[in-house]
Amino acid sequence: MANQVAAMCDQLMKAVNVMMDAESSQIYRLEALKFCEEFKESNSLCVPCGLQLANKAQPAVVRHFGLQVLEHVIKFRWNNMQQQEKLHLKECAMQLLLDGTHSILEEESHIKDVLSRIIVEMIKREWPQHWPHMLKEMEDLTSQGEAQTELVMLILLRLAEDVITFQTLPTQRRRDIQQTLTQNMENIFGFMIAVLKVKLIPVARAHCRVAVATLNTLAGYIDWVSLVHITAGNCHLLEILCLLMAEPELQLEAVECLLIALSRKGKLEERKPFMLLFDDTAICYIQAAAQAVEVVERRYIFLKRLCQVLCALGGQLCQLVGSDVDVEVPANLGKYMEALLAFTTHSSQFLKSSTLPTWGALFRHETLSKDAVVAQMAIQYVRASMDNLVKTGFPSRNDSPSCEYSRVDFDSDEDFNSFFNSFRAQQGEVLRIACRAVPLEAFQIAAEWLQFQITSPIDTGDATSTTGGLCSLLSPSVVQWDAMTVFMECVVSQIFKTLEEEKLPIDQSMELLQAVLNYDTKDPLILSCVLTNVSALFPFVIHRPHFLPQVLSKLFQAITFELDQEIKTPRTRAVKNVRRHASSAIIKICRDYPQFILPSFDLFYTHVKKLFASEATLTHMEKCCLMEALVLISNQFKDFAKQKAFLDELMESVVADWTSEEMRHVLWDPVALLSFVGADQMADDQSKDADRASLNRGRLSFCLYAMLGVVKRARWPADLEEAKAGGFVVGCTPTGAPIYRNPCTAQFLLLLPNLLALVRTHNSLFLPENTARLSEDFCRAHDVMDAEKSMVLGLSHNILDFYDSPVYKTNLERMQGFFTTLYEYCFQVLGNAGVSLQQEFYTIERLAEEIAGAAFVSLDHVPDHRLLRLFLRQLVVSCPPDYYETVLCPLLGPVFGYMMQRLNVKWQVINQRTSMNQESQVTQEMLEEQLVRLLTRELLDLLTVSCISRRVPEPAANKEEIDGEKEEMMDSTQTPSTAQPTEELTELGKCLMKHENIYMSLLTLSFTSLSWKDATNCHRTASMVCWTLLRQVVGGNLLPEAVTWFYTSVLRGLQVHGQHEVCNSTLSLLAMLIYENLRPRYVELHAVMMQIPNINVEALDQFDHRLLDPNAQKVGDKKRKDQFKKLIAGTVGKALCQQFRKEVHIRNLPSLFKKPKPEKEVLSSEDLGLTALFSPNADAL
């Protein structure tokens, strides 16, 4: 046999060398791999060959393969091995631990790893029942030297990972091992602490390696053991970890352990000892460890972890102070906050961002926020925010100390930009909370900063824009103005919420505003910031009304802002942003302070008329923004006749144009529309036809913009008495609710016929005969626009690249943009009409037929990206209940029926797709799939809004008090809660239910969608919609085929989504609800269950017996759910990564929890049974 083993080992070594040799051909490598795998699977010489190959005289790759063979034997053959074979393999493995490796500094880490895995695989199968002295044997091994100690640590770590973290064992085995580990935890921790204590005295590098392994193992235990072990001996372990942070070789591992410990949840009483870390000694250690400026990767990772430790400590402080546990505010709170501030002012943007949640928690805390130290620190934090809001640190640049750190943290400027935008939003939130504590001091800082920016000369820096001498987004002046603007907005928004009126710094703010209004700049990026400051300071103007004309004048100037350029080029994005910014600022002021603006209405209106009449090149959108602002102010007339007269005057030209005979001809005929907008002509910028077509597109766009602006903004007074006095109330509903009239209704009714005609005509444009009429230049006019594509696919673009270049658009892009805008605005007008006009809209004669006859024609030809419209949702939300039957049912029924069929076909196509090689085709398919996904979610959202009313469940107990107790933790499988659904039907849902065809469409849609490849939608529909709808008809006479179909639909969902734990949980609960409620009347469900692969028939019969027999013993809710989940487990589809994995079977051992039998004879006769198998004394067998 020795010869056989030697020969086989020789062949295996050759095969391993072929596999690992870079020069080997693929054919030879595959042959070698096949030979090795077949050997592992079937050869009877695996153990002797594995041991021979694992000899330390062999090369590392050969040894590694030998050890892998042994691991494979234990994992897949252990259950079929004889006891003597198991004992032999165990003894050989222990011998390998003792002398089968090189010294600790020479041995390869992958050899140590596989050797530790071999021991852990045996432990998982035999400990503690058959190998009771395993821990003692491991302890004895550690006395043999550093190499053995390190291996023992790796074994303990791997064991904890498999049992606790990854849970790769059957439940009973996991419970047995965890229970035994827990019982021995005091000894295990004592042993690890003893190893670490040695390291506190300077020793050789070998012991340093042992200490690293010990800390890594400790990290695997700290996050789940009882807190008692962590805080024992006055937090002795945490003290050692603090001391080890001074050791460069160990500081990273030590801080990782400390972080895991301080991040623990659990009973507050048990966490109280953590407050010892606020003592002088611990804080000093942390501060000393943080002193470093070099950007060395390991050192920088350590700083990140140290920062997280401080934040976790702050989290514990916020939970303990002010709770039922008696914890005082630490005397060293000031020192702690200084340490936190040091990280907040660090050059690394990532470190700064890490501290924000902790600052927020401190400033928000009911007790701590009132402490004088925290209030004083709030001022320092506000000052630190000035620097932190400045956008510097792009990885590609070298203009800030942050850049070096950013190169470690971010792959590109786009990554950094995305991070910083999120970081700035968080900063704003925390800054606002800090300002509540020190509102006047914060305002003083903001005022000084603004004054400084106004008096500072503009510094364009080296990154000047392409438009000659102006700033770029990265110019020093722009980044400072930008940061200061955000700062000012945060401070001012809080000062009004915090201070009483008489304490407001009105005079100082007016001086500031005057300085801002007087500041004149032609740089669009800085002017944009100036406008934001004007908006931010505007609330103070309420107290000094004489400033209003100056403010309006500044904003009106900005609306017509142009760069002084002789050359007629398109405006840059920066210029467009200034004009858009000014328009938005005017609308915001008129929306928030209409009563204040009302006295200046005539002045405002006159100014707008002058702008409209002048040569100023206002875009249609800008004109409509000014019209919107006027409508907002007119709402304050509170006089129906006066407001209607004004709106009639304002919209006179729009109404005349939209209702003209020419426009009617265009809007009702697809051919005429295409010709009118120039889509059937070749693109030629020089021709008169092109100019005319461009003007025609402008006419259509302007009419729609103006329509939307008026319909969206015109309102009756919120106060009922004022509404009655102003003539807005025309009667009452039978329930006594007032019926209002909107001053824009008459106009809207005039505009509606042509609006619906345009919707119908636009849908008709997708018919083949009309797409054929598009000219060659515009044949892609209905395609998804590039910007829309990026949005759908979640692709970001770098804003730094094109902010200052003129916005040139191709003729095709203009046409695409026009058709997109046309379609969207039509539906926005319709959706807002329901919200604004209410009864007056829903009482329009034949409204449902008119909308259906426009919006739902030619749908088979309308592409998915044009179907993503939300107007139906708005109609549903704003519809009074009296009109559910006449308006919503005739609209929603056909929509749900049609979309169900359309989406089902689309998802079948997606499910059958195979991957393509061409990148462009893959991208197109990704786009199509994402559009279908968005359309599906939008439709199911409409269904949910229409039918489902969600009850808010009772709040759970304080989550901080829920501890991972030992017993609870063993039972937990980290599944989400599966409480009974609390959803009910809405009134509209009950109305839809009366129509059998609509109701069946809703049921079919919701149950079919469970197996569409969209896990988010599946979870939401299964948890909220399916049972709520089905429950309404459970008591009725459903056909057996229908019941079978509903149930199999859920099982199909499990097959597609069952590998996702959240989906698995909701679908399993839904399946159980259906089975339990319908099985007593429908025996067909039993037949469905019998078709499930590997169904346990006996368990199914028991489940049915308990369900059907009223006298049968009932089991608890949780146990019932677990039993049912096991029954249907065969339907759960496997994730791709699991489908070809070989199953590992670990047998359960006799339970540790059973009481011993009283018969002494039996016990004594079994004295040398299985328990002795792994006894250190081999003679015991």
Image (spheres, grey):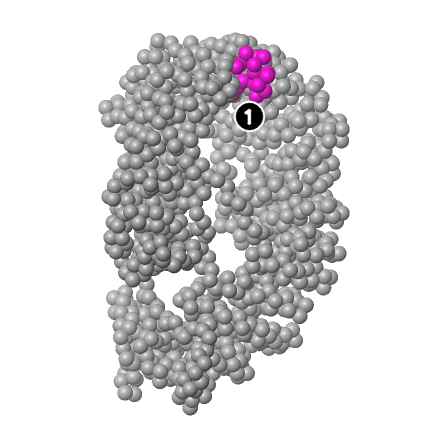
Image-based side of 897 in relation to 1157, left or right = left
Q: Quadrant of residue 24?
A: bottom left
**Quadrant holding the C terminus:** bottom left
Residue furthest front in the image: 1111
Image-based side of 542 in relation to 919, left or right = right
Report x, y in % for residue 776: 28, 26
Residue at x-position 51% and y-position 64%? 967
Report x, y in % for residue 773: 26, 22
Reading the image, the residue beneath label 1 is 584
Q: Element at badge 1?
A: helix
Q: Quadrant of residue 935?
A: top left
Q: Is residue 481 magenta?
A: no
Residue 777 visible from this viewpoint: no
Residue at x-position 33% and y-position 66%? 1143
**Quadrant holding the N terminus:** bottom left
| Amino acid type shown at disc 1 | Ser
Q: Count neighbours of disc 1 (C-alpha within 10 A) and say few if under 14, some if 14 to 19, many if 20 or more.
A: some
Region in magenta: 710-729
Q: Is residue 370 above or below residue 636?
A: below
Report x, y in % for residue 1002: 33, 36
Q: Which of 995/36 is in front?
A: 995
Q: Is residue 720 magenta?
A: yes
Residue at x-position 28% and y-position 80%? 44
Residue furthest bottom in the image: 1179
Q: Which of 1175/1108 is in front?
A: 1108
Q: Is residue 1097 above or below residue 607?
A: below
Image-based side of 442 in relation to 573, left or right = right
Number of dots carrying numbers = 1
Report x, y in % for residue 273: 67, 62
Residue at x-position 62% and y-position 36%? 486
Residue 790 visible from this viewpoint: yes
